[in-house]
Amino acid sequence: MPDRPLPIPTPTSQPYWDALRQHRLVLQYSPSTGQWVYYPRNLAPGTLADDLEWREVTGTGVVYTFTIADRPTAPAWQGASPQLIAVVELDEGPKMTTELVGVAPDAIRIGMRVRAVFDDVTGSEVTLLRFRPTSGASR
């Protein structure tokens, strides 16, 4: 991967990045609200409950929406076109913005089943989360 900006974990998001490095996907869960929380934060949205805990999720879901960026989305992505940018709705409910891999642009469909893949960035301690189609059908 060319020199591209990488995420910088914060104390709040560090457990998320540590799990990705282990090829696991964890998200925060609020027992008091019974809801999953993504992106990482200190307090549950809406109630400000301080009971957020990290739980492992399946890493499977569906394409909720997507776009095909034929032009670089930033200078560092020059030559990386097309970018297959999607919002994936995990089976547990949260939606995550991500990049699709292992699929032709014309094969992407809303509702397409996908699974997490873990992209260890060479020369760094960062693992990026991406999604690829599963062999199953749409929901």
Image (tube, rainbow, N blue to C red):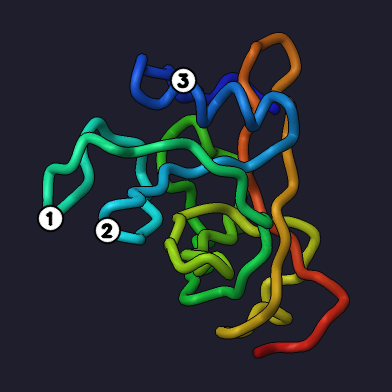
User: How far from the left and from the top, in percent, is residue 105?
Assistant: 68, 72
SS for callout 3: helix
Q: Which residue is mark 1?
A: 46
Give the mark nearest the N terminus, 1 or 2.
2
User: How far from the left and from the top, in percent, is residue 81?
Assistant: 61, 52
| Residue pictured at 53% horizontal, 38% vertical | 77
Q: Which residue is mark 2?
A: 33
Quadrant for the N terminus in the image: top right
Residue 112 to residue 28: above or below: below
Q: What's the residue type where badge 1 is placed?
A: Gly
User: How far from the left and from the top, in percent, is residue 120?
Assistant: 74, 27
| Residue pictured at 65% horizontal, 49% vertical | 130
| Residue pictured at 78% horizontal, 87% vertical | 137
Using the image as rendered, state which of residue 12 and residue 125 is in the foreground.
12
Q: Which residue is mark 3?
A: 14
Q: Is residue 86 left or right of residue 43?
A: right
Q: Is residue 133 left or right of residue 29?
A: right
